[in-house]
Image (cartoon, rainbow, N blue to C red):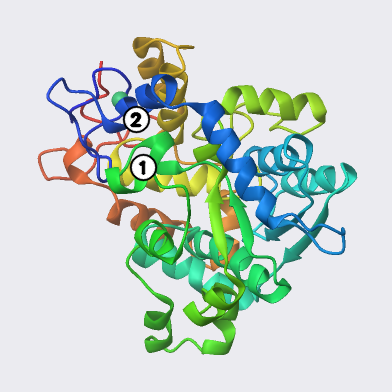
Amino acid sequence: MRYCKKCIYPDTRPEQVFDEEGVCDACRSAERKNVSINWEERRNEFNKILENYRNKDGSWWDCIIPVSGGKNSCYQALTLKNEFGMNPLLVNFIPCEMTEIGQKNITFLRNLGFDIIQVGVNRKVYRKMSSKGFFDLGDCCWPEHIGIFTTPVRVAVQYNIPLIIWGENSQLEYGGPASWREKNCLDRNWLEQFQMLGCRISDLIDEGYDRKDLIGYEYPSDEELKKIGVTGLFLGYYIFWDNMVQAQQMIDMGFTVNPDGPCEGGYYNFENLDCKWIGGLHDYMKYLKYGYGRATDQLCIEIRNGRMDRSEALKLARELEGKIPKKYHQDYLDFIGCTDKEFRDNLDKFTNKKIFEKDNDGKLIRDENGDVIKIDYGY
Ligand SMILES: [Zn+2]
């Protein structure tokens, strides 16, 4: 594995590009973000756009904000309301298994004066899709990753609220194809390129799923979107995004973080709190596929914001990620109805054998805790 010279991203990361100095595109993107973007100008531009969507007589909501019960969405909601004077309708797609903390943070938002719609889809089909995600696509949260993007758009159409405010532009924060990095909006193409893992809703119907069970996952048609004029904007395009600073603001206002410290496989205690498997299993599968997990993403942000040095981040990443998550292990087996052996065999199936230690027979070597061992930790 080759690692970025500035942060700790490895070259196994999908769509990762290193320049001639060995620096990744996420680091280069952060330099632009810190230096060459005029944030004042962008904020004014945002204000002007919002003006077109503000409901003048207070008879309807001004915009939609998708919320998960995590820090990002709480920050979006409060920023739009308090800094930009908008009256948003919050939309929450209920994850596979919402945690108590996630629900608490949804209530926190209502207590702060927001209206919210919670959408819960058919759990029988959810379970089937989660199992497909886990066994076929290597992402146990696959249906959730679709639902959180389709549901707010469906509500926008249904409620005739054309503006949707999304959070960070993940290609700007974490790197990605250049054409997407400077994007201010999120649309069907974005969803299909980054969230669907190559499997479309129509493929599910071909596989025997009933279309009526998938309504919640279907993106509205182009005609519907055009009729309402639905526009989705990234707040992270218009205002400077800093996770740590935002989290502190939310915590000061009463946002609940993980009481046991960093979420499993992560470095922050304020991210991935809303769903039982997103912080643990989903991120662990990413680690097996690409050799890095959520802690790496978060530590890279800390490096880029000048709060941590590279060697400390490498050490922390090794300590924090790459361990089979335990907290909700049994819950997940019960949810999709598989045995521990089937579960572990499937993890092995998605493990990139090139980046983990193997014995002479090509079998993965495990440490005393049963975890696979990376060949190169980037030191
Ligand atoms: Zn980098």
Q: Which is nearer the N-term, disc 1 or disc 2?
A: 2
Q: Using residue 292 as the reference point, say whether residue 316 is left or right of it.
A: right
| Mark 2 residue type | Ser
* Vertical relation: 32 (above or below) 89: above
| Mark 1 residue type | Arg
* Vertical relation: 190 (above or below) 178: below
Secondary element at tag 2:
helix
Q: Position of residue 100 (x, y in %)?
A: 76, 47
Any mark on residue 268, and which?
A: none
Q: Position of residue 19 (x, y in %)?
A: 17, 28
* Vertical relation: 151 (above or below) 285: below
Residue 100 visible, this orientation: yes
Residue 177 visible, this orientation: no
Disc 1 versus disc 2: distance between alpha carbons?
A: 8 Å
Secondary element at tag 1:
helix
Which residue lies under the disc numbered 1? 181
Bin the neighbour count of mark 1 within 10 Å (Cα to Cα): few under 14, some 14-19, many 20 and up. some
Which residue lies under the disc numbered 2? 29
Residue ID at (78%, 36%): 82
Q: Position of residue 176 (x, y in %)?
A: 32, 42
Bin the neighbour count of mark 2 within 10 Å (Cα to Cα): few under 14, some 14-19, many 20 and up. many
Which quadrant of the view contains residue 310?
Answer: top left
